[in-house]
Image (cartoon, helix red, strand yellow):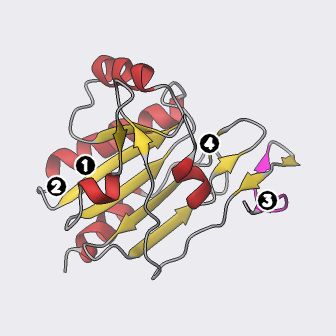
Amino acid sequence: MTTVRTDVFKLGDKFATLLGDEVKVGQVAPEFTSVIAGWGPVNPLQESRGKVIILSAVPSLDTDVCDRETRRFNEEAAKLGDDIVIYTISTDFPMAQKRWCGAAGVDKLKVVSDVLETDFGLKYGLVIKERRYLRRSVFVVRRDGKLTYVNYLPTLGEEPDYDEVITAAKEALK
């Protein structure tokens, strides 16, 4: 049974319906399956097991804030070692993600789509029912699979504190 929350997050001046339970620091990051270009399934936590993982959830790469956020995390990914992997997850179609990444020159992070089953969105409490896209948020997963950083942004237009996220990821390496 999916949890439904109607008093947590607003779209404009009205509360939106969020599906799923929020995750918390210290718990094991829930496994999820998304898709990549060509519609192939991918489980980012399994694919990058043993590394520190940053999961950046965005509504759509085709919006200004999501565009800036993903470009910024791509720049950060270029400076990080191979032990930290960054994923951007949206409900955009995989072919649209691939086209956007090509046009934006984003090639240092991985972009995956939650469009089919919203598995990630439901397990992390991010699905905005009224729009069927994800609430902006960022998570850091330690090498052992536990969450060390969780940030649900209060509005869709607010960007994360990039320095705080990168610092949390570097701390999780220790």
- Which circle, 3 or 2, is nearer the viewer? 3
- Which residue is at the front of the view, 163 or 92? 92
**C-alpha span from label 1 to label 2:** 6 Å
Give the mark nearest the N terminus, 4 or 1. 1
Magenta-tinted stretch: 4-11
Q: Quadrant of residue 11?
A: top right
Disc 4 marks which amino acid?
Gly
- Give the secondary structure at mark 2: loop
**C-alpha span from label 2 to label 4:** 26 Å
Give x and y (percent) for residue 36: 36, 33
Marks 1,2: beta carbons within 8 A: yes
- Give the secondary structure at mark 4: loop
Residue behind mark 4: 157
Farthest right residue in view = 14
- Which circle, 1 or 3, is nearer the viewer? 3
Q: Is residue 106 above or below residue 168?
A: above
The residue located at (81%, 48%) in the rendering is 16
Give x and y (percent) for residue 33: 43, 48
Disc 2 marks which amino acid?
Leu
Give x and y (percent) for residue 71: 34, 36
Asked whether 163 falls inside the magenta stretch, the response is no
The residue located at (25%, 49%) in the rendering is 76
Q: Tell me the number on the disc at residue 4.
A: 3
